[in-house]
Amino acid sequence: MPRVQLPAVTPKRRAWNKGRIIGQKRPLLPKQVWAIRARLELAGYLRDLALFNLAIDSKLRGCDLVKLAVSDLEKDDRVRERVSVIQSKTKRPVQFELTENTRETVISWVKSPEMFACPFMFPSRFHDRPHISTRQYGRHVRDW
């Protein structure tokens, strides 16, 4: 039985993922984490610093991180040392501890004028949305 050789087909367009890293990314090194923290502190980005510190301490998914409420983290004008959150994907509670640096950042962010009477930790600038979206969070992570 003869084998049929088909002509080689060359793509007309470049593949969308050529040269890009797709899939799971490598974790940040401790040196990179401290560099990002230092840059955010020096630039005075209090919200981004609180978001970054909470992401590192909690290891929550982005969708759960942006939905954190002020009442989840704060009680009686103090930030809790241990926080419990129910994940949206698994519907299971996750408990994590906040470091002293993160607690200081969170309390200063909550007391800032931008957070006046906001129920969520990271409110959206648009009035019809209660908190930032996961896409906005992804853009922040990419920019860091």
Image (tube, helix red, strand yellow):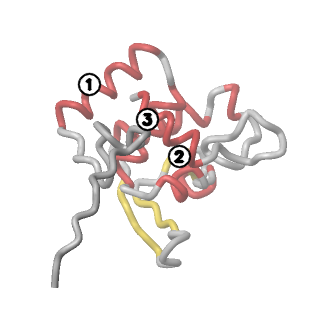
The residue beneath circle 3 is 104
The residue beneath circle 1 is 35
Q: Secondary structure at mark 2?
A: strand
Position of 67 with respect to 43 (left or right) is right
Q: Residue at x 46, y 61 (%)?
A: 83
Of residues 23 and 87, the one nearer the viewer is 23
Between discs 2 and 1, the one toward the N terminus: 1
| Residue 11, image x, y percentages | 38, 45
The amino acid type of the residue labelled 3 equals Glu
Q: Residue at x 58, y 54 (%)?
A: 68
How busy is the neighbourhood of tag 1: few (under 14 within 10 Å), some, or many (20 plus)?
few
Between discs 1 and 3, the one toward the N terminus: 1
The residue beneath circle 2 is 78
Which of the two marks, 2 or 1, is nearer to us in this view? 1
Position of 85 with respect to 124 (left or right) is left
Q: CA distance from mark 2 to mark 1?
A: 27 Å
The amino acid type of the residue labelled 2 equals Arg
Q: Residue at x 71, y 49 (%)?
A: 119
How busy is the neighbourhood of tag 3: few (under 14 within 10 Å), some, or many (20 plus)?
some
How busy is the neighbourhood of tag 2: few (under 14 within 10 Å), some, or many (20 plus)?
few
